[in-house]
Image (cartoon, grey):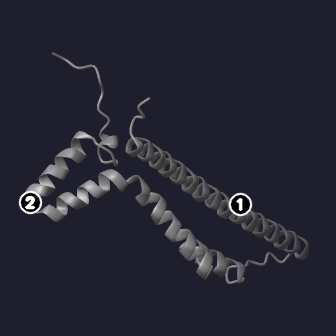
Amino acid sequence: MHCNTTYDAAQAGRPGFTPLTVGLTILGFLIAWPLGVAALAYVFFGHRIRGFAEGLRAGFREKTGFGGWRDAAETVRRSGAFAERTGNAAFDEYRRREMERLDAERRRLDQERREFETYVRDLQRARDQQEFDRFMEERRRRQDGPTTA
């Protein structure tokens, strides 16, 4: 019997209950129980790992003002270390103004990116709070039990 459902191998390693994650969890428990617990934690909380890592990176950027090699290269470029003079004062002045305009645009885009990251974090917090509130409400209803007339 042939099954028409397709299995996406790229989805296999994603968090959630897939045949791969279930198998790895069982194997982890068979080898050593901490590996099984780690696999279960990945299944349940793995979707938050990426957001957590991005949040750490954003926090580091905000606190230090340094976002990695791209920012280091930008600092060197702005310092004039690679500024080339053409010998034409008008063109050099035009180039300088355009570079300043592009730097201002880059700073504006970086600010928009930071604002968007904050917005997405706030949305995730709101979703988490909503799920928690729904859970607590359902739990309260189960504990209250059915009322008899």
Please give the label number shown on residue 64: none
Location of residue 144 by image quarter: top left
Residue at figure coordinates x 30%, y 48% from the top left: 13
Please give the label number shown on residue 31: 2
Confirm whether residue 67 shows in the render. Answer: no
| Residue 102 x %, y % | 77, 65
| Residue 17 x %, y % | 28, 42
| Residue 111 x %, y % | 71, 65
| Residue situated in front as seen by the camera: 143 or 81 | 143
Please give the label number shown on residue 112: 1
Q: Amino acid at mark 1?
A: Glu
Q: Secondary structure at mark 2?
A: helix
Residue at figure coordinates x 44%, y 47% from the top left: 140
CB atoms at circles 2 and 1 under 8 Å apart? no
Q: Secondary structure at mark 1?
A: helix
Dot 2, crowdedness within 10 Å: few (<14), some or many (≥20)?
A: few
Seen as rendered, the residue at the extreme top is 1
Q: Is residue 20 left or right of residue 95?
A: left
- For the N terminus, the quadrant is top left
Residue at figure coordinates x 44%, y 58% from the top left: 50
- For the C terminus, the quadrant is top left
Q: Is residue 132 left or right of residue 74?
A: left
Q: Is residue 15 left or right of residue 99?
A: left
Whether 71 is drawn above or below 40: the answer is below
Whether 26 is drawn above or below 99: the answer is above
Q: Which comes sooner in the sequence, label 2 or label 1?
A: 2
Residue at figure coordinates x 55%, y 57% from the top left: 125
Location of residue 81 by image quarter: bottom right
Q: Amino acid at mark 2?
A: Ile
Confirm whether residue 62 shows in the render. Answer: yes
